[in-house]
Image (tube, rainbow, N blue to C red):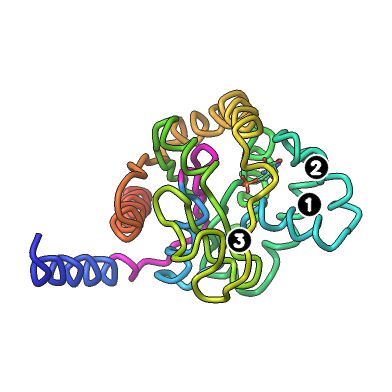
Amino acid sequence: MSSSASASAAKVLESEQRAATMIVPGPILLLGAPGVGKGTQAKELVRLWGIPQISTGDLLRANVAQGTGLGKVAKEIMQRGELVPDSLVNEMVAVRMQESDTVNGYILDGFPRTIAQSHWLDGRLASQTETLPVVAVSIQVDYNQLLRRITGRRNCPVCQRIYNIYSNPPQRAGFCDVEGAPLAQRADDTEKVFAERMRAYAAQTTPVVEHYRELGRFAEVVGDGPIAAIAAGIVAAVERLRSERS
Ligand code: AMP
Protein backbone atom coordinates (compact mmCIF):
# COMPACT_ATOMS: atom_id res chain seq x y z
CA MET A 1 0.00 0.00 0.00
CA SER A 2 1.35 3.53 -0.83
CA SER A 3 2.02 5.88 2.09
CA SER A 4 -0.91 8.18 1.12
CA ALA A 5 -3.24 5.15 0.84
CA SER A 6 -2.14 3.84 4.22
CA ALA A 7 -2.52 7.34 5.74
CA SER A 8 -6.09 7.57 4.45
CA ALA A 9 -6.82 4.00 5.63
CA ALA A 10 -5.55 5.03 9.07
CA LYS A 11 -7.86 8.10 9.00
CA VAL A 12 -10.89 5.95 8.12
CA LEU A 13 -9.99 3.54 10.94
CA GLU A 14 -9.64 6.46 13.36
CA SER A 15 -13.00 7.99 12.43
CA GLU A 16 -14.69 4.56 12.65
CA GLN A 17 -13.18 4.10 16.07
CA ARG A 18 -14.37 7.55 17.14
CA ALA A 19 -17.93 6.76 16.00
CA ALA A 20 -17.84 3.38 17.74
CA THR A 21 -16.68 4.91 21.00
CA MET A 22 -19.89 6.93 21.40
CA ILE A 23 -21.38 4.05 23.42
CA VAL A 24 -21.09 3.70 27.21
CA PRO A 25 -18.91 0.58 27.23
CA GLY A 26 -19.87 -0.82 30.66
CA PRO A 27 -17.99 -3.80 32.09
CA ILE A 28 -15.97 -5.63 29.42
CA LEU A 29 -14.12 -8.92 29.82
CA LEU A 30 -11.09 -9.47 27.64
CA LEU A 31 -10.49 -13.21 27.41
CA GLY A 32 -7.80 -15.19 25.63
CA ALA A 33 -4.78 -17.39 26.27
CA PRO A 34 -1.60 -15.95 27.83
CA GLY A 35 0.17 -13.75 25.26
CA VAL A 36 -2.77 -13.04 22.93
CA GLY A 37 -2.34 -9.32 23.61
CA LYS A 38 -5.02 -8.70 26.26
CA GLY A 39 -2.80 -6.16 28.04
CA THR A 40 -1.90 -4.31 24.83
CA GLN A 41 -5.52 -4.23 23.69
CA ALA A 42 -6.76 -3.17 27.12
CA LYS A 43 -4.43 -0.16 27.00
CA GLU A 44 -5.74 0.74 23.53
CA LEU A 45 -9.35 0.48 24.78
CA VAL A 46 -8.51 2.61 27.84
CA ARG A 47 -7.36 5.31 25.41
CA LEU A 48 -10.47 5.00 23.20
CA TRP A 49 -13.11 4.69 25.90
CA GLY A 50 -11.57 6.52 28.86
CA ILE A 51 -12.39 3.68 31.25
CA PRO A 52 -9.79 1.87 33.40
CA GLN A 53 -8.10 -1.46 32.80
CA ILE A 54 -8.30 -3.84 35.74
CA SER A 55 -5.59 -6.41 35.19
CA THR A 56 -5.45 -9.06 37.91
CA GLY A 57 -1.93 -10.06 36.74
CA ASP A 58 -0.72 -6.44 37.14
CA LEU A 59 -2.47 -6.05 40.52
CA LEU A 60 -0.93 -9.29 41.77
CA ARG A 61 2.55 -8.31 40.50
CA ALA A 62 2.19 -4.96 42.31
CA ASN A 63 1.30 -6.86 45.52
CA VAL A 64 4.35 -9.11 45.05
CA ALA A 65 6.61 -6.08 44.44
CA GLN A 66 5.27 -4.33 47.56
CA GLY A 67 5.57 -7.49 49.66
CA THR A 68 1.94 -7.36 50.89
CA GLY A 69 0.34 -10.40 52.58
CA LEU A 70 -1.43 -11.22 49.31
CA GLY A 71 1.83 -10.75 47.39
CA LYS A 72 3.65 -13.21 49.67
CA VAL A 73 0.99 -15.89 49.04
CA ALA A 74 0.79 -15.17 45.29
CA LYS A 75 4.51 -15.03 44.48
CA GLU A 76 5.35 -18.73 44.30
CA ILE A 77 2.01 -19.70 42.79
CA MET A 78 2.62 -17.20 39.97
CA GLN A 79 6.18 -18.41 39.44
CA ARG A 80 4.84 -21.91 38.83
CA GLY A 81 2.25 -20.57 36.32
CA GLU A 82 -0.63 -21.79 38.48
CA LEU A 83 -3.69 -19.79 39.52
CA VAL A 84 -3.94 -17.78 42.73
CA PRO A 85 -6.97 -18.91 44.86
CA ASP A 86 -10.31 -17.44 43.73
CA SER A 87 -11.21 -15.88 47.08
CA LEU A 88 -8.01 -13.79 47.16
CA VAL A 89 -8.34 -12.62 43.55
CA ASN A 90 -12.10 -11.86 43.91
CA GLU A 91 -11.47 -9.73 46.99
CA MET A 92 -8.71 -7.80 45.19
CA VAL A 93 -11.05 -7.15 42.21
CA ALA A 94 -13.94 -6.15 44.51
CA VAL A 95 -11.80 -3.42 46.08
CA ARG A 96 -10.64 -2.12 42.68
CA MET A 97 -14.17 -2.13 41.19
CA GLN A 98 -15.35 0.26 43.91
CA GLU A 99 -13.07 3.09 42.77
CA SER A 100 -14.85 6.10 41.23
CA ASP A 101 -13.19 5.80 37.80
CA THR A 102 -15.29 2.66 37.05
CA VAL A 103 -18.72 4.37 36.67
CA ASN A 104 -18.82 4.13 32.84
CA GLY A 105 -17.28 0.68 32.84
CA TYR A 106 -13.91 -1.02 33.00
CA ILE A 107 -11.90 -3.59 31.13
CA LEU A 108 -11.23 -6.74 33.10
CA ASP A 109 -8.01 -8.24 31.79
CA GLY A 110 -7.09 -11.71 33.04
CA PHE A 111 -10.27 -12.05 35.14
CA PRO A 112 -12.42 -14.14 35.46
CA ARG A 113 -10.10 -17.06 34.85
CA THR A 114 -12.19 -19.79 36.50
CA ILE A 115 -15.89 -20.58 36.37
CA ALA A 116 -16.11 -19.79 40.12
CA GLN A 117 -14.67 -16.32 39.47
CA SER A 118 -17.25 -15.74 36.70
CA HIS A 119 -20.14 -16.81 38.95
CA TRP A 120 -18.81 -14.46 41.64
CA LEU A 121 -18.60 -11.60 39.11
CA ASP A 122 -22.07 -12.29 37.63
CA GLY A 123 -23.58 -12.31 41.14
CA ARG A 124 -21.88 -9.09 42.07
CA LEU A 125 -22.95 -7.27 38.90
CA ALA A 126 -26.53 -8.60 39.18
CA SER A 127 -26.77 -6.91 42.59
CA GLN A 128 -25.73 -3.55 41.07
CA THR A 129 -28.89 -2.70 39.10
CA GLU A 130 -27.46 0.52 37.67
CA THR A 131 -24.54 -1.36 36.05
CA LEU A 132 -24.76 -2.76 32.49
CA PRO A 133 -24.31 -6.54 32.19
CA VAL A 134 -20.83 -7.69 31.40
CA VAL A 135 -19.91 -8.61 27.80
CA ALA A 136 -16.96 -10.85 26.94
CA VAL A 137 -14.59 -10.66 23.97
CA SER A 138 -12.07 -13.42 23.38
CA ILE A 139 -8.88 -12.74 21.37
CA GLN A 140 -7.67 -15.69 19.26
CA VAL A 141 -4.02 -16.37 18.32
CA ASP A 142 -2.41 -19.73 17.40
CA TYR A 143 -0.13 -21.62 19.84
CA ASN A 144 3.25 -21.23 18.07
CA GLN A 145 2.80 -17.53 17.62
CA LEU A 146 1.89 -17.22 21.30
CA LEU A 147 5.05 -19.06 22.31
CA ARG A 148 7.21 -16.52 20.38
CA ARG A 149 5.25 -13.63 21.80
CA ILE A 150 5.68 -14.87 25.37
CA THR A 151 9.30 -16.03 25.33
CA GLY A 152 10.36 -12.94 23.31
CA ARG A 153 8.56 -10.44 25.54
CA ARG A 154 10.68 -7.87 27.42
CA ASN A 155 9.59 -4.78 29.31
CA CYS A 156 11.20 -1.59 30.52
CA PRO A 157 11.01 -1.52 34.32
CA VAL A 158 11.01 2.32 34.23
CA CYS A 159 8.34 3.25 31.62
CA GLN A 160 6.64 -0.20 31.27
CA ARG A 161 7.02 -0.09 27.44
CA ILE A 162 6.78 -3.62 26.03
CA TYR A 163 9.15 -5.01 23.37
CA ASN A 164 9.52 -8.37 21.66
CA ILE A 165 13.00 -9.57 20.66
CA TYR A 166 11.51 -11.25 17.54
CA SER A 167 8.81 -8.89 16.31
CA ASN A 168 9.42 -5.52 17.98
CA PRO A 169 13.06 -5.38 19.18
CA PRO A 170 14.57 -2.29 20.82
CA GLN A 171 17.17 -0.37 18.75
CA ARG A 172 19.97 -1.50 21.09
CA ALA A 173 19.51 -5.13 22.13
CA GLY A 174 18.52 -5.39 25.79
CA PHE A 175 17.86 -1.69 26.47
CA CYS A 176 14.77 0.54 26.38
CA ASP A 177 14.71 3.00 23.43
CA VAL A 178 13.23 5.75 25.60
CA GLU A 179 14.74 5.26 29.06
CA GLY A 180 17.96 3.44 28.15
CA ALA A 181 17.22 1.12 31.09
CA PRO A 182 18.11 -2.60 30.86
CA LEU A 183 15.02 -4.52 29.77
CA ALA A 184 13.52 -7.16 32.04
CA GLN A 185 11.77 -10.47 31.38
CA ARG A 186 8.84 -11.63 33.50
CA ALA A 187 9.80 -14.67 35.59
CA ASP A 188 6.81 -16.58 34.17
CA ASP A 189 7.60 -15.85 30.50
CA THR A 190 9.78 -18.95 30.01
CA GLU A 191 8.77 -21.85 27.74
CA LYS A 192 8.25 -24.25 30.67
CA VAL A 193 6.02 -21.86 32.61
CA PHE A 194 4.24 -20.88 29.38
CA ALA A 195 3.25 -24.54 28.85
CA GLU A 196 1.82 -24.66 32.38
CA ARG A 197 -0.06 -21.38 31.91
CA MET A 198 -1.56 -22.74 28.66
CA ARG A 199 -2.59 -25.91 30.48
CA ALA A 200 -4.21 -23.84 33.26
CA TYR A 201 -5.95 -21.73 30.60
CA ALA A 202 -7.34 -24.73 28.72
CA ALA A 203 -8.50 -26.49 31.89
CA GLN A 204 -9.87 -23.56 33.86
CA THR A 205 -10.65 -20.68 31.51
CA THR A 206 -12.26 -22.56 28.59
CA PRO A 207 -15.41 -23.08 30.75
CA VAL A 208 -15.50 -19.29 31.33
CA VAL A 209 -15.56 -18.73 27.55
CA GLU A 210 -18.35 -21.30 27.19
CA HIS A 211 -20.30 -19.67 30.04
CA TYR A 212 -20.44 -16.25 28.37
CA ARG A 213 -21.04 -17.84 24.95
CA GLU A 214 -24.10 -19.63 26.35
CA LEU A 215 -25.38 -16.37 27.86
CA GLY A 216 -25.14 -14.77 24.38
CA ARG A 217 -22.79 -12.10 25.68
CA PHE A 218 -19.72 -13.28 23.83
CA ALA A 219 -17.71 -12.45 20.69
CA GLU A 220 -14.42 -13.67 19.22
CA VAL A 221 -11.89 -11.50 17.39
CA VAL A 222 -8.72 -12.52 15.53
CA GLY A 223 -5.69 -11.25 17.47
CA ASP A 224 -3.23 -11.29 14.58
CA GLY A 225 -2.57 -7.95 12.83
CA PRO A 226 -2.01 -4.26 13.62
CA ILE A 227 -2.93 -3.25 17.18
CA ALA A 228 -5.39 -0.55 16.00
CA ALA A 229 -7.21 -2.96 13.67
CA ILE A 230 -7.65 -5.54 16.44
CA ALA A 231 -8.90 -2.80 18.81
CA ALA A 232 -11.40 -1.66 16.13
CA GLY A 233 -12.65 -5.26 15.93
CA ILE A 234 -13.15 -5.37 19.71
CA VAL A 235 -14.97 -2.01 19.74
CA ALA A 236 -17.27 -3.19 16.93
CA ALA A 237 -17.96 -6.48 18.76
CA VAL A 238 -18.84 -4.68 22.01
CA GLU A 239 -21.07 -2.21 20.18
CA ARG A 240 -22.89 -5.09 18.47
CA LEU A 241 -23.32 -7.02 21.74
CA ARG A 242 -24.59 -3.90 23.53
CA SER A 243 -27.08 -3.03 20.74
CA GLU A 244 -28.39 -6.63 20.63
CA ARG A 245 -29.18 -6.38 24.33
CA SER A 246 -30.81 -2.91 24.31
P1 AMP B 1 -1.26 -12.56 33.63
O1 AMP B 1 -0.38 -11.36 33.71
O2 AMP B 1 -2.71 -12.20 33.43
O3 AMP B 1 -0.79 -13.59 32.63
O4 AMP B 1 -1.20 -13.27 35.09
C1 AMP B 1 0.02 -13.74 35.61
C2 AMP B 1 -0.26 -14.74 36.70
O5 AMP B 1 -1.01 -14.13 37.76
C3 AMP B 1 -1.08 -15.94 36.28
O6 AMP B 1 -0.27 -16.96 35.67
C4 AMP B 1 -1.65 -16.38 37.64
O7 AMP B 1 -0.67 -17.03 38.43
C5 AMP B 1 -1.95 -15.05 38.31
N1 AMP B 1 -3.31 -14.57 37.98
C6 AMP B 1 -3.66 -13.48 37.22
N2 AMP B 1 -4.98 -13.33 37.14
C7 AMP B 1 -5.52 -14.35 37.86
C8 AMP B 1 -6.86 -14.77 38.15
N3 AMP B 1 -7.92 -14.12 37.64
N4 AMP B 1 -7.02 -15.85 38.94
C9 AMP B 1 -5.97 -16.54 39.45
N5 AMP B 1 -4.68 -16.22 39.21
C10 AMP B 1 -4.44 -15.13 38.43
* Magenta-tinted stretch: 20-36
Identified by mark 2, the residue type is Ser
Residue at image point 56% right, 33% down: 208
- Tell me the element at label 1: helix
Q: Residue 79 is drawn in which quadrant?
A: top right
Q: Are marks 1 and 3 in contact (CB under 8 Å)?
A: no
Identified by mark 3, the residue type is Leu
Callout in the foreground (3, 2): 3
Callout in the foreground (1, 3): 3
N-term-proximal mark, 3 vs 2:
2
Q: Which mark is residue 87?
A: 2
- Residue 146 image offset from top left, x and y in percent: 46, 37
**Residue 246 is at least partly visible in this image:** no
**Furthest residue in direction front, as rendered:** 172
Q: Which mark is residue 91?
A: 1
Q: Specify whether 90 is left or right of 45.
A: right
Q: Specify whether 158 is left or right of 62.
A: left
Taking the magenta stretch, the answer to whether it contains residue 175 is no
Which residue is label 3 attached to? 183
Q: Are marks 1 and 2 in contact (CB under 8 Å)?
A: yes
Q: Specify whether 47 is left or right of 108.
A: left
